[in-house]
Amino acid sequence: MPGSPPRRTRIAVLYGGRSTEHAISCVSAGSVLRALDRRRYDVVAVGITPDGRWVLGPDDPDALAVRDGVLPAVDATARPVVLPGDPTVGGLIALDGVAVSAGPGPADRGTADLGAVGLGAVDVVFPLLHGPFGEDGTVQGLLEMAAVPYVGSGVFASAAAMDKQYMKILLAAAGLDIGPYTVLRAGQALSGDDRERLGLPVFVKPARGGSSIGISRVDAWDDLATALKAARAVDPKVLVEAAVVGREVECGVLGSLDGGGPEASLPAEVTVASSAGSAGFYDFEAKYLSDAARFDVPANLPAEVTAAVRQIAVRAFVALDCAGLARVDVFVRPDGSVVVNEVNTMPGFTPTSMFPRMWAATGLDYPRLVDRLVALATRHGTGLH
């Protein structure tokens, strides 16, 4: 209608999930909800419970914050919803039969045909899901089937980056230095040859996990069995990696809106203090629950090393065919050479997360970062590219 205000983009913020990173996903979602400008966006918060149920969540950042060391979780008693893998629907449906309006839908995806249970069409999904059943291509596949654009990488890149074994294979194929490692499937033990090749200390990691959950540093082979048990509680496939002597550095990568190549942020350095509350590396507690970690944003690196880190981060992003965003974690050796540790296709968005802090230091603050990710998702759309 003449004089009508422009329609706001409707965003579904998806969080929680079935992985061990459920709580961190909730905290990330709270931060994004706080940053989304309601003058520009209609927002629908959708939580996924630890057992996989989709529910309508509160559009309330404070409800998803860490309080007195207690991590948030999705309320399993909330109204159930579903996103059908049907491209003719294009939106969310409430399963309790009670209609809820989320604002006017897109012109080509009206809500009238959804019936009394329609929650409204969705323009973009922001899947703030970390770990399996969310960051690994599963939700991305559902969104592709539903033809709903979403923030972040597609099915292949999400799956490849989530599985550290295949991530390393692709990075090595692109000529990037990844450091020595071996993979142990369920029931397999570390061979004597691998022990000699890797040396001590080693890091034992779930192959398809995140937020440092299930990771242990092993300084004596007698402790390996305990570390393997902790990692296999998260994932039956485990990586054992040689420790890399060097500085732990992270770098954010964003897709370009002008048709150019991906762009890298200024890098940041993580330093973990040896303290009673920390495992001596950047573990879950150091990341989210204590002050054991120090962050230098940007990292105090020589200019040529900073340039190398940014270039390598973009190469890793391209090697995995990422889209939208990623955080690339590397080690910088004393000689200035760079070893790629891993690529995270949906990095944390909590108030202390490195990805938004690095982009803020580069000149893109949190609200504009979220705006850019939504714009990238809208432009990228779904389907083959």
Image (tube, rainbow, N blue to C red):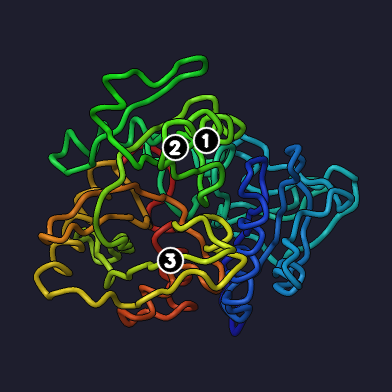
Real-space Cα separation, disc 1 to disc 2, in angstroms? 6 Å
Residue 87 vertical position relative to residue 110 in the rendered view, above or below: above
Q: Looking at the image, is mark 3 or mark 2 earlier in the sequence?
A: 2
198 or 170, which lies in front? 198
Expressed as whole percent of the image width and height from the top left, the position of residue 66 reads: 70, 68
Residue matched to label 3:
272
Helix, strand or loop under label 3: strand
Q: In this view, does 140 lie above or below 288?
A: above
Image quarter in which the N terminus is found: bottom right
Q: Do the residues labelled 1 and 2 touch (CB within 8 Å)?
A: yes
Which residue is disc 1 drawn over?
A: 227
Q: In terms of image quadrants, where is residue 85? A: top right
Could you tell me the amino acid type at mark 2?
Val
Q: Which of marks 1 and 3 is nearer the N terminus?
A: 1
Q: Which sits in the foreground, 46 or 334?
A: 334
> Circle 1 — which element?
helix
Residue type, mark 3 in image? Val
* Sequence-wise first label, 1 or 2: 2
Asked if one can make out residue 125 in the rendered structure from this viewpoint, the answer is no
Q: How crowded is mark 3: few (under 14 residues within 10 Å), some or many (20 or more)?
A: some
Q: Mark 2 points at which residue?
A: 204
For badge 1, the amino acid type reads: Ala
For the point 41% across and 69% down, the residue is: 372
Label 1 neighbour load within 10 Å: few <14, some 14-19, many 20+: many
In what element is the residue under mark 2?
strand
Q: Can residue 3 be seen in this view?
A: yes
**Residue 62's spot in the image, x, y percent?**
74, 74
Say which residue appears at 59% left-offset and 85% top-offset: 3
